[in-house]
Image (cartoon, grey):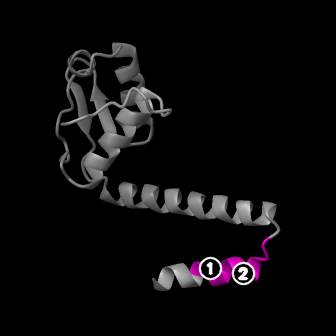
Amino acid sequence: MKIIINNSSMVPIYVQIIQQIKAQIADCSLKDNEALPSVRALSKDLNISALTVKKAYDELEADGFVTTVHGKGTYVNGNNSEFIKENRLKEVEDEIRTAIEKADNYAIPREQVREMFEMLIED
């Protein structure tokens, strides 16, 4: 598993870890039931606090991407491809909703937004 931390990014380090692990699960570079590095090992490799790694792992577990077995480690959840697909759909839906809200704030008519959307889909 490869994680690259950008210390100059405005994105918190634990969020960078979450995003990269989710991406690796989605592209199957992290396989179902594969063990993640221990919190201590990953924090040492990245030269960051173990609490930061723990926070990332806890959020990944809360979102259903990994499972932690006390005393054994943290593993990629098996058979979560449908969950990943649903999560991606929700992310796209949220982005579209944000764009619609921005258009509303700029007083751009909904019909014009629909036309833009259709035009962008065709590209």
Find the distance from the CA under tag 2 to the CA under tag 1: 6 Å
Residue 14: image location, x then y, percent:
41, 28
The C terminus, quarter of image: bottom left
Which residue is situated farthest in the right direction here?
107
Within 10 Å of disc 2 (Cα), the crowding (few <14, some 14-19, many 20+) is few
Can residue 25 be seen here? The reply is yes
Q: Is residue 67 above or below residue 50?
A: below
119 to the left or right of 107: left
x and y percentages locating residue 27 in the rendered image:
24, 55
Relative image position of residue 66 (x, y in whole percent): 31, 38
Residue at (26% x, 34% y) in the render: 3
Element at label 1: helix
Q: In which quarter of the image is residue 104?
A: bottom right
In front of the other: 17 or 65: 17
Give me the residue at 48% from left, 86% from top. 122
The N terminus - image quarter: top left
Q: What element carries label 2?
A: helix
Find disc 1 in the rendering and name its residue: 116
Report if residue 65 is visible in the image: no
Residue assigned mark 2? 112
Label 2–label 1 contact, CB within 8 A: yes
Give yes or no for residue 113 being in the magenta stretch: yes
Residue 31 position (above or below residue 99): above
